[in-house]
Image: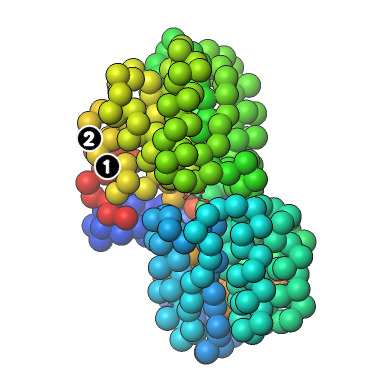
């Protein structure tokens, strides 16, 4: 396991029909110290009561963000803050700016945001910070100069590696042409993963896989569906699609499962079990990956609470306790890593519900 990350223990999730991350004894990013009070910082102080914490997802009508933001809400309730969620219905680059300005005017203590663009919202975030807010990016980062902390779902390498492993297994030993169906062209998270997947593809084990195209469904269901259709029309020899977006993989699954490509063109990527269950059951998809979105939001809320209470400043080495998830340590570039991605297959998908 890579230093600075920790495994996701799914036995607990399988029992509770919910995810839970767990401790790894030798792990520097923390996890599961168990005995710490829910609202304490590792330095011994407590998160202040009454903090106004707002979640601003890439878009509000995306089930992934419903789950992650509800995780944040649970955390905010634990440390007796006041939670809100706001945001655009489309994940376009500057759509979040006006929401940030409003949150700043409302004297929000912590803005927890998944960025649609690494630069477009920087000015607004920095103004909010000057007005006293702490900014935590989660899921999709901004330029590091515009936020106090980034809560990353998993290591970038881990997310890239699992998707290539799964597409390679699904396509089979002969390999062939593959394509990527992404979210928006500006999304920091997807773009980082795509770059890393390209680096992974250069490894000897993937010489038979050839990336022929990358298209963008903008995290819109219908556009992602149409882009999938377009990929298959344009590349008659396509053997597989990687969609590193929960919206994209679900739309691609729906298209493939109702087409003659079902079972012939492989699909994997990052999806939620509830959106992908039907396509795993009907044989369209063998496996896909994700982390625990609820834990991601929960951790981001605790990080924001610790910042706004002065328990941490966001510098490397800072430690804080994130309730049931245990202790975390801030790593390089003000980044905190939740864990590693989990793989969903027909064998486990019925035991996970989100
Ligand atoms: C979509 C969004 C989100 C990403 C997931 C995997 O819901 O693009 O940012 O993390 O997919």
Residue where numbered disc 1 is placed: 277
Number of numbered discs on residues? 2
Ligand 1 lies under 8 Å from the Cβ of mark 1: no
Q: Quadrant of residue 102?
A: bottom right
Across and down, in percent, residue 147 comes to 70, 65
Residue where numbered disc 2 is placed: 281
Q: Is residue 182 left or right of residue 293?
A: right
Q: Is residue 134 visible?
A: no
Across and down, in percent, residue 347 comes to 24, 38
Across and down, in percent, residue 269 comes to 45, 36
Q: Is residue 24 visible?
A: yes
User: Which residue is located at x 38 percent, y 20 percent?
Assistant: 265
Dot 2: few (<14), some (14–19), or many (≥20) neighbours within 10 Å?
Answer: some
Across and down, in percent, residue 136 comes to 62, 67
Residue 230, compared with residue 55, is above or below; it is above
Residue 48, compared with residue 144, is above or below; it is below
User: Which residue is located at x 66 percent, y 65 percent?
Assistant: 97
SS for dot 1:
helix
Q: Nearer the viewer, residue 267 or 346?
A: 267
Residue 13, compared with residue 148, is above or below; it is above
The answer to the question of whether label 2 and label 1 lie on touching residues, with beta carbons closer than 8 A, is: yes
> Alpha-carbon distance for marks 2 and 1?
6 Å
């Amino acid at each position: 396991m890579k230093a600075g990350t920790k495994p996701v223990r799914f036995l607990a999730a399988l029992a509770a029909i919910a995810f839970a991350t767990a401790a790894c004894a030798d792990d520097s990013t923390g996890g599961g110290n168990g005995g710490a009070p829910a609202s304490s910082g590792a330095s011994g102080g407590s998160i202040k009561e009454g903090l106004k914490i707002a979640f601003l997802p890439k878009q509000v009508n995306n089930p992934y963000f419903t789950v992650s933001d509800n995780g944040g809400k649970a955390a905010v309730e634990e440390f007796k803050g006041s939670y809100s969620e706001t945001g655009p219905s489309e994940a376009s680059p500057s759509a979040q700016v006006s929401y940030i300005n409003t949150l700043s005017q409302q004297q929000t203590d912590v803005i927890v945001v998944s960025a649609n663009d690494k630069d477009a919202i920087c000015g607004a975030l920095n103004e909010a910070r000057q007005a006293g807010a702490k900014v935590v990016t989660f899921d999709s980062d901004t330029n590091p100069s515009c936020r106090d902390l980034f809560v990353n779902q998993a290591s970038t390498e881990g997310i890239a590696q699992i998707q290539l492993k799964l597409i390679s297994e699904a396509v089979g030993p002969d390999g062939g042409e593959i394509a990527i169906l992404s979210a928006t062209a500006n999304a920091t998270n997807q773009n980082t993963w795509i770059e890393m997947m390209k680096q992974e593809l250069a490894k000897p084990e993937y010489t038979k896989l050839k990336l022929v195209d990358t298209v963008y469904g903008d995290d819109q269901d219908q556009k992602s569906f149409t882009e999938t259709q377009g990929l298959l029309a344009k590349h008659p020899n396509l053997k597989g699609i990687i969609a590193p977006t929960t919206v994209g993989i679900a739309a691609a699954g729906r298209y493939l499962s109702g087409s003659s490509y079902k079972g012939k063109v492989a699909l994997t990527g990052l999806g939620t079990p509830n959106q992908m269950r039907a396509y795993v059951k009907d044989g369209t998809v063998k496996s896909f990956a994700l982390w625990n979105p609820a834990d991601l939001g929960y951790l981001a809320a605790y990080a924001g609470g610790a910042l706004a209470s002065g328990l941490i400043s966001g510098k490397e080495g800072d430690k804080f306790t994130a309730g049931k998830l245990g202790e975390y340590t801030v790593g390089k570039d003000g980044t905190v890593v939740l864990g590693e991605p989990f793989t969903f297959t027909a064998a486990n998908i019925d035991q996970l519900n989100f």
